[in-house]
Image (cartoon, helix red, strand yellow):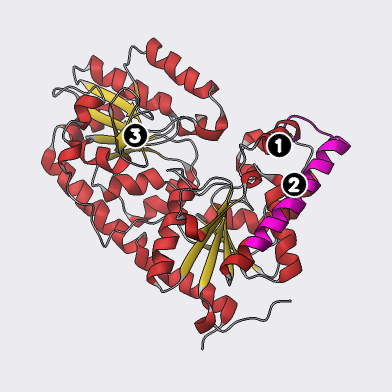
Amino acid sequence: MRRRKRISDVKNIGFISTRIAGTDGVSLEAGKWVEVLEDMGYTCFYFAGKLDTPPERSLFSPKAHFTHPEIDAINEFAYNNLTRSEDITDRIERIKRELIYDIKRFIRTFDIDLIIVENAFAIPINIPLGVALVEFVAETGMPTVSHNHDFYWERKRFSVNCVWDYLNKAFPPRHPFIRHVVINSEARNQIALRRGAAAIIIPNVMNFAKPPPPPDDYTLNVKKDLGITDNEYFILQPTRVVQRKGIEHAIELVNRLGRKRVKSKLVISHASGDEGDEYERRVREYSKLMRVNTMFGSSLINDERGSTKNGKKIYRLSDVYPHVDLVTYPSAYEGFGNAFLEAIYFKKPILVNTYSIYLHDIKPKGFKVIEMDDYMNEKTVNDVIEILQDKNKIQDMVNHNYNIAKRFYSYANLRRKLRFILTDFFGED
């Protein structure tokens, strides 16, 4: 077993995930943890199957990514069958051993003192990685933080499977060297119920002590490039195109606004990601049925500025937000709500569906938003129009929300909780 270091001797922290790249919620939140930890004096390193982190502080392991052909084949079989073949078991075990070797190499290369596992113990889209990590921790006693964003039991796609033994072992594991972090109170209740494990709640955060900079010249033509005219309201759906995001509600809103002679344009910022394209086809069909010209903006909105092959500008999401009139967030379920905090950070009014985590964890803080209760109705549409057409009311709303978020969802809160976890592992000097 590893000798437990004093907290003053802890220098290097390793982040491990399937992917640490792009603008997905897990990567974004991991980046915020890195900012705070490095501000606290630690150096952070990265292990994943897809990375856009500094190469000199990263170890790339191809089979850690869920899109690797061998991992994809395991997933395809695992979540479509009730019994598994010996071949699938052998594949999982073989890749697990390869990943343990890579993890040990990562720890040695960068002299890691503590690892933070980003969702790889929560969502089983890479079974060998989760099992490799729990066996590595069991063999070495490595202090480990499991940062769990969403669990497999929250997703219908994992309910039919032939890997219950692996899910019970590693998704998430219960182990004395692992401290679990969850992002909402329901997840804390469920991990206690299902695993008998304690967890600390650390919700998503933004750096509210540092407001966003004003738009620069690069962003002058954002609305024009996204196909929005001067007499249209810019409505942003800042999410991936997946079913639980409830994007049909945003489309219906634009349709209803049009019938009231309030012109608007809906832009969806992200592609479908790792959950397939069927729902995106459904959203495109629904847009046509509702006669709403929805802009699917993932080709022009990315994590870095640049140009498309035909010379069009690529914008960051932070470039787009200042030009937005309303953010729609009609999700049926969210682990927390990164887009909710982003809208508040950029001081934009929000239409939010009253999903359970919003009701239990967010609404009680006192935010002022336009609410809908699982369906669009006349009152919600009128509330939207009232806000869009009253700049004073918008300013009162967004400033109030910013101040609330600064109290509860700031980097200062994250720093305090990370300090608590580190002290729990290593004690005080």
Name the residue carrying label 3: 301
Q: Position of residue 98 (x, y in %)?
A: 73, 51
Name the residue carrying label 2: 95
Name the residue carrying label 1: 70
Does residue 103 sit above or below 62 in this rendering? below
Check if mark 1's residue and mark 2's residue have beta carbons within 8 Å: yes
Question: Mark 1 falls on what kind of element?
Answer: helix
Question: Mark 3 falls on what kind of element?
Answer: strand
Q: CA distance from mark 2 to mark 3?
A: 35 Å
- Within 10 angstroms of label 2, few (less than 14), some, or many (20 or more) residues? many
Does residue 257 sit above or below 397 in this rendering? above
Magenta part of the chain? 78-105
Q: CA distance from mark 1 to mark 3?
A: 30 Å
Residue 22 numbered tag: none
Residue reaching furthest to the bottom: 429
Q: Earlier in the sequence, mark 1 or mark 2?
A: 1
Q: CA distance from mark 1 to mark 2?
A: 9 Å
Q: Position of residue 368 (x, y in %)?
A: 28, 47
Horizontal arrangement in the rendering, residue 294 relative to residue 88 (left or right): left
Question: Mark 2 falls on what kind of element?
Answer: helix
55 and 420: which is toward the camera: 55
Q: Position of residue 59 (x, y in %)?
A: 57, 55
What secondary structure predominates along the stretch shown in magenta? helix
